[in-house]
Amino acid sequence: MVKAAGIGIGIGATATVTTTALATPAGAAGAPLAHPGLLHTRADLDRMAAEVKTGARPYAAGFAELTANRHAQSGWRPNPQAVVYRGSGTPENYGILYNDIHAAYQNALRFHVSGEEEHADTAVAILNAWSGKLTRLEGSADRFLAAGLYGYQFANAAELVRGHGDFDLGRAQELLRDVFHPLSDDFLTRHNNAVVTNYWPNWDLAAIACVLATGIFCDERAVIERAVEYFKHGDGMGSVRHAIPVVHEDGLGEWVEAGRDQGHALLGVGLMGTVCEMAWNQGIDLYGYDDSRFLKGAQYVAKWSLGGDVPYTANTRRKGAIGGWSGSETASDVASVDPTMTRPIWAMIANHYTKRRGLSASYLTRAAAKAAPEGGGGDYGPNSGGFDQLGFGTLAFTRDRATDPTAPASAPESESSATGADARARTAATATALPSTASGRDLAATGAEEAVGWAAAAGVTAVAGGVLLLRRRDRVRREAE
């Protein structure tokens, strides 16, 4: 029986949108894909190492969060399983997988920042153990969540050690191609034999993240294009216009899963941000797609999660199995929120729009400031929800404002051909010798727009500059139509 994942929205809601051109993919002319090139590029890793070395704020606090996490300790012993189960009615053991993946990721990230090779060795041992044993993901419909979430996370951990001499790159690629990716791709195609609106956006978004990460990690352009096309035009609830079906007069983009609950809405925003960041690092601009629709949706969820009032359009969608039971369900208002609830999702998104793009996004800035310093898996409770994001965004994504926010992302240095010894030596040298570019400033205090958000977070009434900017753009667009 298809697992009913909740309620959703019909596709007919009105929205004011304009399609914008995507950046040219990094490999469009046949050049190799950038590695590392998932959530972190070589420039990102070098920046983290240099800033932490000088004790710059807020990088030092972000790194302290990482080193304090029990998953980030060298010598973590993996417990690989041949079959991983997730879902009721099965002998669930998926917690073993996500704990081990987060230990691999955290140790790999710690190595790149500190240059301590024992952390790279630990990450490699964990990843090699799993790629040498895992053969299947089983369970209820939740097996698709396991494939999507842990597939994109495994790829990101592995990407950070792909140049290590002891890392079995081919076997890791095989695991993604044969175990994680097939379930995610099948979900985007058939949705577990359910009607396409049966599943909330986070199901699609987890699958998109896995497909995109697999394509990048395995250097398969057709797989990358599949994920990008679904993000833009997919039939399911996770494509951008279905996840954010309405753009309101105030410039906020209604996040459909806000009609379900806060935790899943935060999950969806975090996953969409993950997809956008991985694509950006390959020269594909999904952040800016459809007049920065994701910015409008993320601002909406940030404001709502901070306790602000947001509009919500009542909506009804079909749910059920194709050729089986069916029904419909209506969401009529936003769910209640707990302003203390947070996920490590905001630093990445806020830094993209306010630093790379130079845009105002005060709700994002306030949410990021409130969540800082962001931790990772193990810092947000022991259950699976605390491991849905890799986290550590304060360390990984804090950046100075770009000199030219309109410039496309430059392709990071490729290290796919480096030997393990060369890669490790270069990273260790980076961690100890790079000059600092630290500004010593907090995320929310780096410009006029961010200062407005910071004041509002402190209880001072402030105008949402980002919302006003988006409102003006929408008004100009409507007058031109």
Image (cartoon, rainbow, N blue to C red):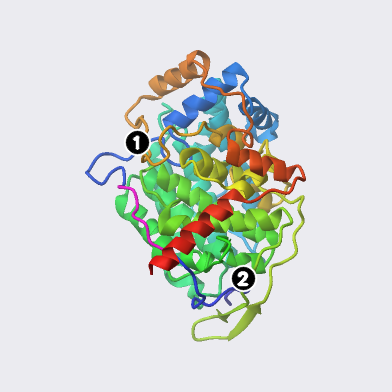
Q: Residue type at mark 2?
A: Ala
Q: Earlier in the sequence, mark 1 or mark 2?
A: 2
Q: Position of residue 126 (x, y in %)?
A: 55, 36
Q: Quadrant of the C terminus?
A: bottom left
Determine the residue positioned at 32% across, 29% down: 417
Give above or below for 166 relative to 24.
above
Give above or below for 288 relative to 391.
below
Q: Residues within 10 Å of mark 1 (few under 14, many from 20)?
A: many
* Quadrant of residue 291 within the rendered picture: bottom left
* Quadrant of residue 63 within the rendered picture: top right
Distance from disc 1 to disc 2, alpha carbons, whole Å, reads: 39 Å
Q: Residue type at mark 1?
A: Ala
**Helix, strand or loop for the magenta stretch, by majority:** loop
Q: Which mark is residue 411?
A: 1
Task: Name the element at disc 2.
Answer: loop
**In front of the other: 305 or 454:** 454
Determine the residue positioned at 51% across, 48% down: 274
Instruction: Say left or right for 81 vs 163.
Output: right
Please say whether residue 21 is one of the residues in the magenta stretch. Answer: yes
Instruction: Say left or right for 441 vs 137.
Output: right
Tell me, yes or no, if residue 148 can be seen here.
no
**In front of the other: 320 or 473:** 473
Tell me, yes or no, if residue 135 can be seen here.
yes
Highlighted magenta segment, given as a residue range: 18-24
**In front of the other: 175 or 443:** 443
Instruction: Say left or right for 232 vs 5.
Output: left
**In front of the other: 270 or 254:** 254
Point out the frontmost of discs 1 and 2: 1
Q: Which mark is residue 5?
A: 2
Residue lying at the far left of the rendered structure: 29
Q: Quadrant of the N terminus?
A: bottom right
* Quadrant of residue 165 within the rendered picture: top left
